[in-house]
Amino acid sequence: MLEGKVALITGAGTGIGRAIALRLAREGVRIVINYSRSQKEALETQKEIDACGIQSLLVQADVADDAEVRRMVQEAVNQFGRLDILVNNAGVTNFVAHDDLEGLKDEYWDRVMNVNVKGVFHCCRAAAAELKKQRGCIINITSIAGMTGLGSSIAYAASKAAAISVTKSLARVLAPEVRVNGIAPGVVRTRWVEGHEDHVERLGSGTPLGRVATPEDIAEVAFSLIAHSHFVTGQNIVVDGGMFI
């Protein structure tokens, strides 16, 4: 069903992005692996994709930079001749307690908005024409923080709320050729939570399903939206083990 298609995944070197890249590669999807700083991890992801017998392309680009994003999309099309799937996974944060208003510096706001919101828009805009040709789809990795106002900082929660709004707007703008959906994870066991393991375990044990998510949990939802959910667009699918029922 997906064999021969091409997916561009931002932040694909680690965590959720890596898990989605590997899940799609197992279905025969050729992968464009984007990274900004995690070159070592991106190369490891590429090695695993190569082991599946799947073509891949490694592209360094900062999604906050529109020119770099346009170059990345063009490189993908030059290499593979098409683009079917875009997964906007790249994201940043700074851990700042919500009651520490003075600690939430302007530079934190600027970077989180530039990557988590403008970065999503940059990628969608740059890829839109190619995705329309293929009647493709976009998955934006948002967060439960964008719905609850909780999370690593007020700025992060605000950026993810904005990303959910962008998802809905683009679902209308790019229809009917392109479907656009979001996935809002709760706590996921990635390097983001390193050093907070005890807190993470407490959060997981308090959910109805009794654990936190793995990157592979999110990848399965992404796969379902890409491969099977052909009449779903403009939605933000919560994947949090029932934490916020």
Image (tube, rainbow, N blue to C red):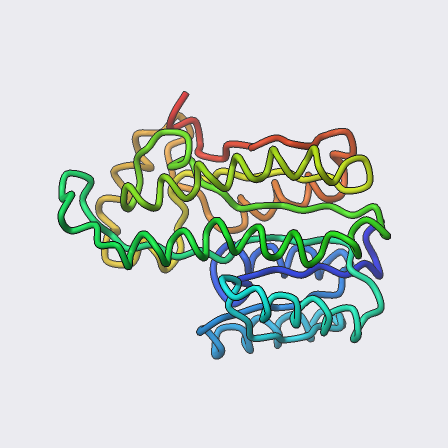
Query: Eyeballing the image, is 93 above or below 200?
Result: below
Measured as percent of width and height from the top left, residue 77 is found at 78, 68
Measured as percent of width and height from the top left, residue 164 is found at 52, 36
- Residue 227: image quadrant is top right
Measured as percent of width and height from the top left, residue 213 is found at 44, 43
| Residue at image location 71% in from the left, 61% down from the top | 25
Task: Report the number of discs.
Answer: 0
166 or 157, which lies in front? Answer: 166
- Residue 93: image quadrant is bottom left
Left or right, 21 with reference to 173: left
111 or 5, which lies in front? Answer: 111
Query: Eyeballing the image, is 86 above or below 167?
Result: below
Query: Eyeballing the image, is 11 above or below 211?
Result: below
**Quadrant location of the C terminus?**
top left
| Residue at image location 78% in from the left, 75% down from the top | 79
Measured as percent of width and height from the top left, residue 23 is found at 65, 55
- Residue 212: image quadrant is top left
Left or right, 200 with reference to 219: left
